[in-house]
């Protein structure tokens, strides 16, 4: 007889195992942590899930997560420079550097014909509308340096350049603190061809 | 501006980070998984937490988790042999082997004077009462092979032997499939002294 088969426990383990990279064993540990914790703590946990789902929406301007639309960044910062990213977590990563002071534009995907994702399936139209309204002068494209990210960057650049907007792409090269010896060939050749005069 | 600072998101991340071995980064991943999932899925998750807390109690007989007391094992199996363990998860581990067909007794702790846990703080009295009522003839002590587990085993053995009950301790030795070379000295010397005639 397996106590993990008792319905409420089995259900909780199942819910935890849906979280990213959570296997059966980890889901069991999480479930037993909940069972051992106080009623109040469990209630707070459940509430925080419902509360977050209820209050967090997408910003109608940039597409990032927010509890009020437009989001704080869209309200408080200049739209002179826009940084275009694939997902909210990418905007978060850039935000953590503290080096970018403009607004973001979240595409919620990249062009990927194999997966059936075309330009109309991501927020490119919204980007064009926004640029038209906000008087943006530069767009930094910060999609990932993979096939889809590059294709999306090229596509957006082609649309924006005729509008007289400066379009730039984040630099690609060897990571700070890494060793040349271990850099892959594509990265290293990119770092050579994009060399910068000192 | 950090979107993780938005109150409902910050709260959810904080709740996830209370789970065992979950750091800040992992808690963020879990939280964004919830934000991205459907309202229905999030509701199911929250419900499963509340439902589990509400329905899962301790079995009044053995002290294991159950949704009805006495639990299925205490109702359906003989109390002739009892297996004494520290925690519910230990009973689960033994149950998974399929080698034990008796009932369990969960101590919910082991004697640990340094942490202020004495014999009266764990379910030893309940064990004595239970044995008196149920006509138990053998008790297998399966606490962990550490200082507290050994001390607890000795303590219980001393109480039960005068009552004419057979008390045994799970075998200690080298693990199946392991290599002698890597066994620690204490385990290896225990394996030697507890050798079994073939």
Image (cartoon, coloured by chain):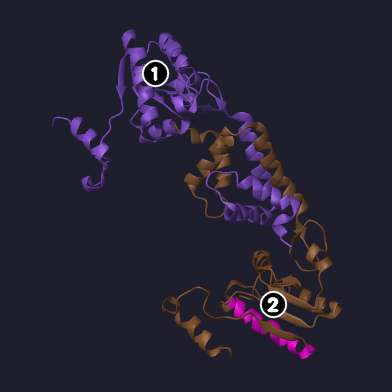
Chain colours: A brown, B purple
At 52% across and 47% down in the image, what residue appears? Answer: B21
* Magenta stretch prevailing secondary structure: helix
Q: CA distance from mark 2 to mark 1?
A: 67 Å
Taking the view exactly as shown, the residue that stands out farthest to the left is B198
Query: In the rendered view, does A70 fall on the left or right side of A110?
Result: right
At 52% across and 54% down in the image, what residue appears? Answer: A21
Instruction: Please name whichever residue, B29 or B71, is drawn nearer the observer in this view of the structure.
Output: B29
Residue, disc 1: B78
Q: Which residues are magenta?
A: A148-164
Instruction: Please name whichever residue, A77 or B163, is drawn nearer the observer in this view of the structure.
Output: A77
- Badge 2, how many Cα within 10 Å: few under 14, some, many 20+? some
Question: Where is residue B83 shown, x and y percent of the image?
Answer: 38, 23
Q: How many marks?
A: 2
Question: Where is residue B90 shown, x and y percent of the image?
Answer: 42, 32
The quarter of the picture where the C terminus of chain A appears is bottom right
- Whether pointer 2 and pointer 1 mark residues with C-beta atoms closer than 8 Å, the reply is no
Residue, disc 2: A119
A92 magenta-colored: no
User: Does residue A73 appear in this view?
Assistant: yes
Depicted A94 relative to depicted B144: above or below = below
Instruction: Please name whichever residue, B15 or B137, is drawn nearer the observer in this view of the structure.
Output: B15
């Amino acid at each position: 007889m397996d106590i993990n088969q008792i319905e409420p426990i089995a259900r909780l383990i199942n819910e935890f195992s849906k979280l990213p990279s959570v296997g059966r064993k980890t889901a069991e540990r999480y479930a037993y942590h909940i069972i051992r914790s106080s009623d109040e703590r469990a209630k707070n946990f459940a509430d925080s899930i419902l509360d977050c789902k209820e209050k967090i929406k997408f910003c109608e301007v940039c597409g990032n997560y927010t509890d009020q639309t437009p989001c704080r960044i869209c309200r408080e910062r200049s739209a002179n420079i826009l940084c275009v990213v694939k997902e909210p977590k990418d905007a978060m990563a850039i935000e953590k550097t503290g080096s970018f002071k403009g607004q973001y534009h979240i595409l919620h995907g990249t062009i990927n014909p194999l997966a059936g994702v075309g330009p109309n399936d991501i927020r490119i139209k919204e980007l064009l509308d926004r640029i038209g309204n906000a008087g943006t002068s530069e767009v930094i494209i910060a999609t990932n340096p993979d096939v889809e990210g590059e294709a999306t960057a090229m596509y957006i650049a082609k649309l924006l350049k005729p509008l007289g907007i400066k379009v730039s792409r984040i630099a690609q090269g060897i990571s700070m603190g890494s060793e040349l010896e271990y850099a892959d060939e594509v990265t290293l050749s990119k770092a050579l061809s994009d060399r910068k005069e000192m």
